[in-house]
Image (tube, helix red, strand yellow):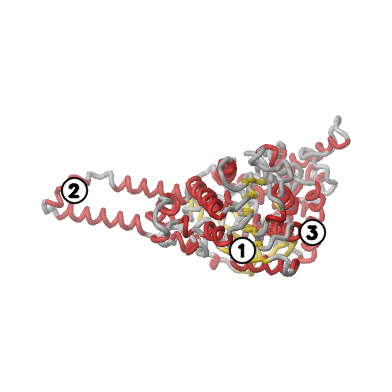
Amino acid sequence: MIAPRDINSVVIFGGGGLVGHQICRLMSKELRPKKIVVCTLFEDEAKETVTALKEEFGNSVEFIPEYGNIFVRESYANKSRAEITSNNGMLAQIYDDVFGDLNGDGKNIVNEGLMPKLILKYRPDVVIDCVNTATAISYQDVKSSSKVVKEFQDALTTLTQNDLKSTIVKAKNGDKQSTDDLCNFASQILELSTSPLESFPHLNNLKMIDLLLISQSVPQLVRHVTLLYNSLLQAKTRAYIKVGTTGTGGMGVNIPFTHGEDKPSFTLMTKTSIGFAHTGLLFLLARSPGPIIKEIKPGAMIGHKRITFKKINKFRQPVVLCESKEETVGKTLTVRQRVSDYKSKGNLELVGVDTGENGFFSRGEYEAITYMDSMEFVTPEEIARNVLYELCGHNTGKDVIAAIDGAVMDPSYRAGYIRQSAIDQMLEMENSKGIPSIAIGELGPPQLSKLLYEAYLLQSVYPTLEEWADRKNSPEQMSKKVVDFLNKHEAKDIITSLGLSILLPDGKTIVRGHTMYIPESKVHATVDVKSEDLDSWAKQGWIDLRNENFAKWKERAKRMIDSREQKFVEGSAAFGPAHYTSKSLKTGEIVGWILSTEFDGSRQK
């Protein structure tokens, strides 16, 4: 426990994020330290946060901006991943920073890392870490890197299967053909090793091996925590509080908000593994001499910051709204084409909710992720309050180091109260802008976006559940009406510009944009098409306008109507994720109900 009067200086990593900013505000109001160092990834974020804090609190606290990637040395802290990975010297240095000896010369990561330098520069009484460490360390696409390296290995194996030893002997004895064969072999090896990769043009196979080595999550995490502990000891910091993550927003392996075709998601499972590995390492620090160590671990989506209408970015690039093209699916399918091959209609803009570092979600995505017993959400103010309580010695029961299971923060009443207000604001702004906010893809799986858009399209043509379920409206009629609606509506180009594809009723023709996220292929731009693939891809993430899919939606509608009329359920028991209680059709809630009932996507506690 630290008396508030003894807290003079604080370093807040991730101070520009939703939680970090609220911690800065709460500390300034209630503890009034002399100095708060606001550390962010980007310079403009640090300066904007400090400016806002100075406007609110004046000179009562000294706010200092710092910025850069705290997981690398200071000289690399403001370089992009592409800049680092395309430079052989930097790759070699990072390998040494992760795996090298910490007791070496004075230029090693202990002395040159940005995080140790900041802690030792300010020697704070308290360090509060709001950086999503598990995401930063685990989201380095080890899976794609491993696939590239394995293909490289297989190619080398094929090249070396010939009888090279006898060829070398013959070449040494002057045989011209053997000499030519060896030269050709060397040329193939050189080409294979150093040519730019298809999906990673700034890398080649040899560099990808280096990248795979330094992208391993556990070694990076161990080194990060080791550097942190050494720095805290040297600075004589008295308390370290981590705002961590469950990796799945408090949900289980049945989480429907994934990151690719796998379920459970390889990426999310890696993130959860690193998130709890981090907790385990902090548990070790808490049992070691040095500062007080605590962790607050929110178990819901953290949000939100603002409702706005803005340009949509994916992978830090603006989404270009392009006119769709029809294409008959053959034996191969190119999932990434040049944007310039499509007629541009400008950058895509949509209404959505800004959740800070967690992303920008459409209304449909927000409705789905905050649906009852889905991920829901918790506010940054609640997290900041628990951080301050724990810092000052109050027992919140939310310190994971003390009690992992009891520490997970559940969705809150306040967040549930605010939810409808946020949705209403988005609806109002959607109406004024004339563009529906259905899905962007920020929640990960194309399947979620597929369901949201299919529900929206049905709702646009048939505005009640009863019409969906009505036998008079056959799947064939529903398919035709939705196709007619799409051909006249901007939604078609929005869908395809976001990387989704539309499978037309003939089951062979697709409407697409320049990029397709299903089939998923981060390594090759063109994939082979097998006869069974279309059904699989339609299920995973294509808007499916075939009759059989509308038959499935009709069956869902019947079950949703039935869920309102459970015989032996009354009072509060009638409200739950299995009961679609809304009297109107709400796109995100429809999909939330589907995720809960068909995908077992509800949280268990």
Q: Earlier in the sequence, mark 3 or mark 2?
A: 2
Badge 2 element: helix
Judging depth in this view, the residue of 508 and 53 nearest the camera is 53
Q: Which residue is mark 2?
A: 167
Name the amino acid, label 2.
Thr
State the image quarter where residue 603 is shown: top right
User: Which residue is the site of mark 1?
Assistant: 319
- Front one among 76 and 31: 31
Q: Secondary structure at mark 1?
A: loop
Mark 3 sits on what residue? 427
Marks 3 and 2: CB-CB under 8 Å? no
What residue do we see at 46% from left, 61% from top? 84
Pointer 1 with pointer 3, Cβ within 8 A: no
Can residue 501 be seen at all in this image of the molecule? no
| Left or right side of 335 for 297 | right
Closer to the chain start, of discs 2 and 1, is 2
Tag 2–tag 1 contact (CB < 8 Å): no
Q: CA distance from mark 3 to mark 2?
A: 73 Å
Quarter occupied by residue 494:
bottom right
* Viewer-side residue, 185 vs 27: 27
Name the spot of residue 52 as percent of width and height, x first.
71, 67
Asked if residue 35 lies left or right of residue 225, the reply is right
State the CA–CA distance, disc 1 to disc 3.
Answer: 22 Å
Using the image, tell me which numbered label, if any, was put on residue 121: none
> Residue 123: where, in percent of width, then height?
58, 58
Q: Is residue 275 visible?
A: yes
Q: Residues within 10 Å of mark 2 (few under 14, many from 20)?
A: some
Q: Amino acid at mark 3?
A: Leu
Q: Could you tell me which quadrant the C terminus lies in?
A: top right
